[in-house]
């Protein structure tokens, strides 16, 4: 009997609508197999943006550290798990979605957090290990109160935003300042959509527009593209200044809106030197 009950519990966490979270979009409105159709489809924006950013940031990552690619590789998994969660509204889907975001944030801390902002008791080599330990503890503790995970993740996001503001205080580069403004604006729009969908659902239902969480997906992946490129640019100026990093936009640098990336205009040192 114990084995049967255990099997039923395991099967239960994979079942449709086993999560305590249900977003504003009407369930099964467009498909009997997809709980939240628009939220699911909008998750695939990660599969479009992530490969573009991997390609655009490769020259910088090759010179700085190829581990930087892990951030956008993990973003692909965020999109995959987000689609799975919104398709099924299962408990497993929820946890995979939220934990993949946690690990993206952890990777961002590990590869980009400014060394000058390290706690005094932390050395360069031990910071990544500290981030790993905290992330593992956070991963385990996320199962205690799953409904609180999203709020905790947004708190991490706020800390990263604070770090960015501190770093930008002495920046005079107009392109970087513009990119910072765009990053913050996109993040504010994204978090506004997330909060409105979560707490203002009845209002949006009256307007017959229950898709703000899907809009959040689109805005947040663009906010990450802009914000991570800005952080990478500041990191490049601090860690590989000889490469003379500059900010460009793809597909056209003169456009007001595009995909930001880093151009290295100086001599690179990827080859072994005596």
Image: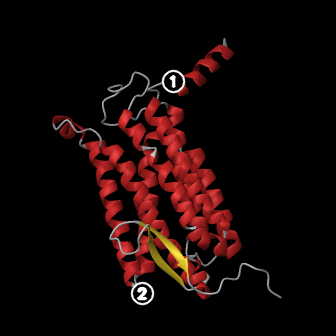
Q: Position of residue 173 (x, y in %)?
A: 41, 85
Relative depth, front residue between 223 and 102:
223
Q: Which residue is mark 1?
A: 15
Query: Quadrant of the rendered structure where residue 22 is?
Result: top left
Query: Quadrant of the rendered structure where residue 250 is?
Result: bottom left
Confirm whether residue 89 shows in the render: no
| Pointer 2 local density, CA inside 10 Å: few below 14, some 14–19, many at least 20 | few
Residue visible at 47% across and 36% down in the picture: 85
Query: From this viewpoint, which residue is outermost toward the left?
Result: 206
Decide: is 270 above or below 68. below
Q: Position of residue 52 (x, y in %)?
A: 51, 59
Q: Secondary structure at mark 2?
A: loop
Q: Which residue is mark 2?
A: 170
Relative depth, front residue between 86 and 249:
249
Query: From this viewpoint, which residue is outermost toward the top?
Result: 1
Q: Secondary structure at mark 1?
A: loop
Mark earlier in primary sequence (2, 1): 1
Residue visible at 44% across and 26% down in the picture: 17
Q: On the rendered structure, is 3 left or right of 167?
A: right
Relative depth, front residue between 6 and 66:
66
Decide: is 128 above or below 192. below
Confirm whether residue 198 shows in the render: yes
Question: In the drawing, what numbered circle is on residue 202?
Answer: none
Q: Position of residue 44 (x, y in %)?
A: 46, 44
Which quarter shows the C terminus?
A: bottom right
Which quarter shows the N terminus?
A: top right
| Pointer 1 local density, CA inside 10 Å: few below 14, some 14–19, many at least 20 | some
Residue visible at 47% across and 27% down in the picture: 18
Q: Position of residue 183 (x, y in %)?
A: 38, 67
Q: On the rendered structure, is 104 left or right of 187?
A: right
Residue visible at 57% across and 61% down in the picture: 54
């Amino acid at each position: 009997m114990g084995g049967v009950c255990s099997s039923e519990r395991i099967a239960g966490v994979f079942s449709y609508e086993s999560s305590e979270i249900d977003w504003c979009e009407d369930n099964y409105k467009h498909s009997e197999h997809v709980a939240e159709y628009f939220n699911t489809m909008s998750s695939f924006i990660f599969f479009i943006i992530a490969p573009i950013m991997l390609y655009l940031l490769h020259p910088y990552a090759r010179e700085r550290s190829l581990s930087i690619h892990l951030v956008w590789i993990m973003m692909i998994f965020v999109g995959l798990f987000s689609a799975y969660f919104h398709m099924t509204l299962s408990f497993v889907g929820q946890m995979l979605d939220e934990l993949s975001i946690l690990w993206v944030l952890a990777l961002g801390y590990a590869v980009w957090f400014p060394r000058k902002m390290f706690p005094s008791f932390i050395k360069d080599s031990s910071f990544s290990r500290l981030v790993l330990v905290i992330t593992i503890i956070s991963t385990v503790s996320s199962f205690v109160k799953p409904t609180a995970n999203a709020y905790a993740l947004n708190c991490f996001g706020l800390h990263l935003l604070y770090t960015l503001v501190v770093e930008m205080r002495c920046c005079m580069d107009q392109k970087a300042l513009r990119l910072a403004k765009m990053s913050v604006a996109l993040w504010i729009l994204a978090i506004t959509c997330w909060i409105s969908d979560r707490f203002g659902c009845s209002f949006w239902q009256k307007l017959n527009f229950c898709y703000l969480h899907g809009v959040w997906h689109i805005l947040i992946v663009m906010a990450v593209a802009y914000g991570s490129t800005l952080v990478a640019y500041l990191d490049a100026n601090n860690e590989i200044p000889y490469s003379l990093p500059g900010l460009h936009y793809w597909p056209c640098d003169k456009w007001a809106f595009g995909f930001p990336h880093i151009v290295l205009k100086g001599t690179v040192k990827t080859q072994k030197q005596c």
